[in-house]
Amino acid sequence: MSKIFLENVKIYAYHGVLPEENLIGTYYILNAELHTDLWKAAASDDLDDTISYAAINDIIHKEMEVKSKLLEHVAGRIIFSLHTAFPQIDYIRLKITKTAPPMKGEMQGASIELERSFKPEN
């Protein structure tokens, strides 16, 4: 299996249930894992034979700009937008971490992770 990773993508955005989260915002850290066949690109050295990680990054940033209450909703939008743009993707795992959630205690963040397989069932 071939994989593309975007790791620790840091984006400032405005997501959350509380009104102040939509006004103040915070940093989010995203990690994406995409499964697709990369062997054609490995042989050809041609960008047209792969999925540009810059294009993946652009989609992630575009979807993060849309304010949402739930990180699950943001992750779902990102996953479906990536698959719509690149239907050759077989599987996507996406983790989003809110770095400063408005909760008691000290922590590095609160995270959700969604994964979706797009392979047809046999």
Image (cartoon, rainbow, N blue to C red):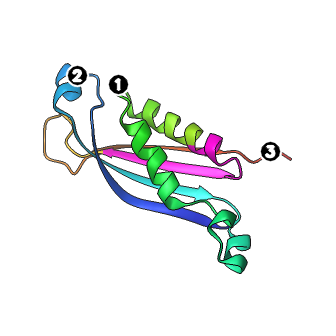
User: Which residue is identified by label 2?
Assistant: 18
| Secondary structure category for the residue under label 1 | loop
Whether the residues at callouts 3 and 1 have beta carbons within 8 Å, the answer is: no
* Total numbered badges shown on the rendered structure: 3
User: Which residue is identified by label 1?
Assistant: 69
> Could you tell which of marks 1 and 2 lies nearer the N-terminus?
2
| Horizontal relation, residue 69 to residue 102: left or right | right
In which image quadrant can residue 112 be found?
top left
| Secondary structure category for the residue under label 3 | loop
Residues 118 and 64: in front is 64
Q: Is residue 84 magenta?
A: yes
Vertical comparison of 115 with 49: above or below: above
Residues 120 and 66: in front is 66
Query: x, y percentage for residue 43?
Result: 72, 79
Whether the residues at callouts 1 and 2 have beta carbons within 8 Å, the answer is: no
Residue under the point 65% across and 49% down: 86
Identity, as a three-letter code, of the amino acid under mark 3 = Pro
| Secondary structure category for the residue under label 2 | loop
Magenta-highlighted residues: 82-97
Vertical comparison of 36 with 78: above or below: below
Query: How many angstroms separate mark 3 from mark 2 (CA)?
Result: 39 Å
Q: Residues within 10 Å of mark 3 (few under 14, many from 20)?
A: few
> Could you tell which of marks 3 and 1 lies nearer the N-terminus?
1
User: Which residue is identified by label 3?
Assistant: 120
| Horizontal relation, residue 42 to residue 31: left or right | right
| Quadrant of the frame with the N terminus | bottom right
| Horizontal relation, residue 89 to residue 79: left or right | right
